[in-house]
Image (cartoon, rainbow, N blue to C red):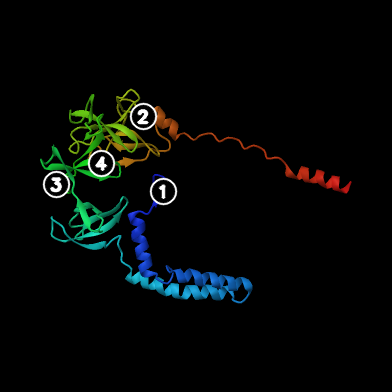
Amino acid sequence: MAKEKGRLFPTELGCLVTDLLVMNFQDIFDVRFTAQMEDELDKVEEGELRWTQALEDFYQPFQKDLEKAKVEMEDIKWKGIATDLICEKCSAPMVIKLGRHGQFLACSNYPDCKNTKEFQRNDAGEIQVIEAEPMQETCEKCGAPMVIKTGRFGKFLACTNYPQCKNTKKMMVNGEGRLEVAQDEVSSEVCEKCGSPLVVKTGRFGKFLACSKYPECKNTKRVGQEGKGKEDGSKPEPTGEDCEECGAPLVYRKGRFGPFIACSNYPRCRYTKKIAKTPDPAKVPAEAAAASKPQPTKPREARPDKTQGVETRTRKKRA
């Protein structure tokens, strides 16, 4: 159900599920079933019918319908509902599928063809395809036109050459209430790996700095309070050892589970290893050494003796 202007309206997903249930469980979704159930409950209350018999009368036909539905009910989640529309990319039939944002059209040749389209129904119930809104914007990676699409975070620009090109751009509403492409904020810092400018991006954990040459260069940095790159003590401190896989120097890093040792050639080399339990204090940074030391345990507080109160109450009763 969806609420609009203080009123509840059924969603497309709710209507579709209801149609499937009515089609496959006609005995239950019937007014006569409700009336019969009320009569049986009255008989149980008056002692004319055992409650176990009432449950058996309901469950036996319901079990047959359930087993039949497991075989014959249409699996709209995976197979979809067939339509008369044809995919313009591979000429396979288009089907209606369910997603987190409702129904959509998808190619039945998935995963070989990943063509999808949004649609709506007119007053007669006919399917009307919602064409992607064209933009005067071309993909800087492959030169193909870009179109407006809708995702979990709202509208965005996507390359029409998908899935060969997965370039996307964020969109924002300007002061006039119109959609426009959100330009990446260029920072004053440069990438130490390739020399390209770093731009401000927004991820699931907030803002961060990323190389503008992505995906050729995947260098990233955290953003400090002043808006500049934060590198946890300028640069990772070397361990004095070399990587066993590529020969690059090993450095100390911090992760969600504490400090660890990693290859400085990341992401080309993803070699990591745990810090020893008794590391050399001269080589390990102060933060890593403090994290590896066992923390003192707090002494437990003495619990009050409950037997003393019991003895006092017993003496009062005897008195």
Examine the image and state in which quarter residue 122 appears. Answer: bottom left
User: Please, what secondary structure does the residue beneath circle 4 have?
Assistant: strand
As shown in the figure, which amino acid type bears the numbered disc 3?
Answer: Asn
As shown in the figure, which amino acid type bears the numbered disc 1?
Answer: Arg
User: Please, what secondary structure does the residue beneath circle 3 have?
Assistant: loop
Residue linked to disc 3 = 161
Residue drawn at x 36%, y 29% is: 283
Could you tell me residue 19's position as x and y percent? 35, 63
Labels 1, 2: front one: 1
Mark 2, Cα crowd under 10 Å, few <14 / some 14-19 / many 20+, is some
The answer for how far apart the CA atoms under marks 2 and 4 are is 50 Å
Mark 1, Cα crowd under 10 Å, few <14 / some 14-19 / many 20+, is few
Q: Farthest residue toward the left?
A: 143
Q: Earlier in the sequence, mark 2 or mark 3?
A: 3
On residue 29, which mark appears? none
Residue linked to disc 4 = 155
User: Please, what secondary structure does the residue beneath circle 1 have?
Assistant: strand
Q: Earlier in the sequence, mark 1 or mark 3?
A: 1
Query: Does the CB distance between marks 2 and 3 fall below 8 Å?
Result: no
Residue drawn at x 33%, y 37% is: 261
Could you tell me residue 42's position as x and y percent? 58, 71
As shown in the figure, which amino acid type bears the numbered disc 4?
Answer: Lys
On residue 283, which mark appears? 2
